[in-house]
Image (tube, rainbow, N blue to C red):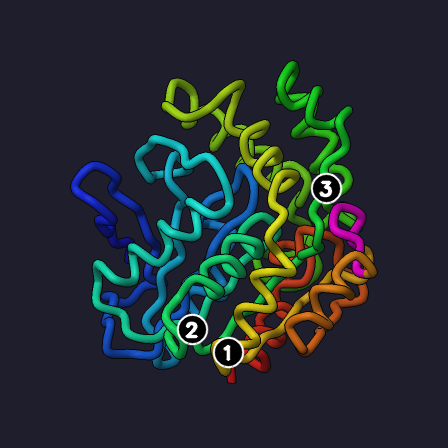
Amino acid sequence: MTTPLTMTPHAPLYAYTGGRPFDPALPCIVFVHGALNDHSVWTLAARWFAHHGHGVLAIDLPGHGRSAGPVLPDVESMADAVLALLAKHQVQRAALVGHSMGSLIALEAASRATPGAISHLVMVGTAYPMRVSPALLELAARTPLAAIDQVVTFSHASMGAKPSYPGPGAWLHGASQALMRQVLARGEGIAGIEHNLFHHDFSACDRYAHGLGAAAQLRAASSTRCSLVLGGRDRMTVPRQALAMAQALQAEVHTLPKAGHALMQEDPDGLLAALRRALA
């Protein structure tokens, strides 16, 4: 089941609800995707939690996937969009789970929320600062399809899926490439983009400079339980680059040793188990 949820009259925000009608009275989990992705990367986790007593919102960020534009300019404004969605639908308390760029959005949203409103923060495949090389940013602006191919290669530690979701023998690189190309194409012509959606998202990650400040605000103002889930073979957000954030958040760290940056694809069962521990 999918539910189109309205953030404002002018900016509809799409959310996948995991096969169950969304009930704001249940413990809520918001899943936030990364750069040039959409809600579909969270399908397994969203369905599991939706069928085990949670209200689930796996969102498409503004201008991504099925959500209308305009695209928002930075991590801070995307965090405000997440909080606006919760307020609009009268969610009093929620857990935030974000991958890559989404982990920065979840962190910023948790730091801006009313104390006590965020029960858990889980940052998946994260690093801080999340710098992007100037060469990759230039390639993304000039030749986004080539940049997608490069990022897909660096995001995966293996070629084929293990005996797990989505199934043995699936071509992980091809699936990731197809999704990113689809999101890129859907973003063409949407307001708020300098070059294209891929360059926009990577630039937002590169510019975000409030991470440690957000972590300090969060630790000082609330009792949010914080966790990091990292891929042991991640070449996009190298695990050691998350150590300062883990310390600042006093976070539990779960490492999936054989996964790269695309943890949801490469070790879906391991990620689900880590999320269940983090959100217990």
Quarter of the figure that contains the N terminus: bottom left
State the separation of the CA atoms marked 1 and 2.
6 Å
Residue tagged 1: 224
Q: Depth check: give the residue in front, 233 or 110.
A: 110
Residue 102, position as x, y percentages in the image: 53, 52
Q: Is residue 236 above or below residue 275?
A: above
Left or right placement of residue 266 versus residue 24 in this view: right
Badge 3 amino acid: Arg
Q: Depth check: give the residue in front, 229 or 43.
A: 229
Q: Is residue 50 visible?
A: no
Residue 192, position as x, y percentages in the image: 41, 26
Residue tagged 3: 131
Mark toward the start of the polypeptide (1 vs 2): 2
- CB of mark 1 within 8 Å of CB of mark 2? yes
Residue tagged 2: 118
State the separation of the CA atoms marked 2 and 3.
27 Å
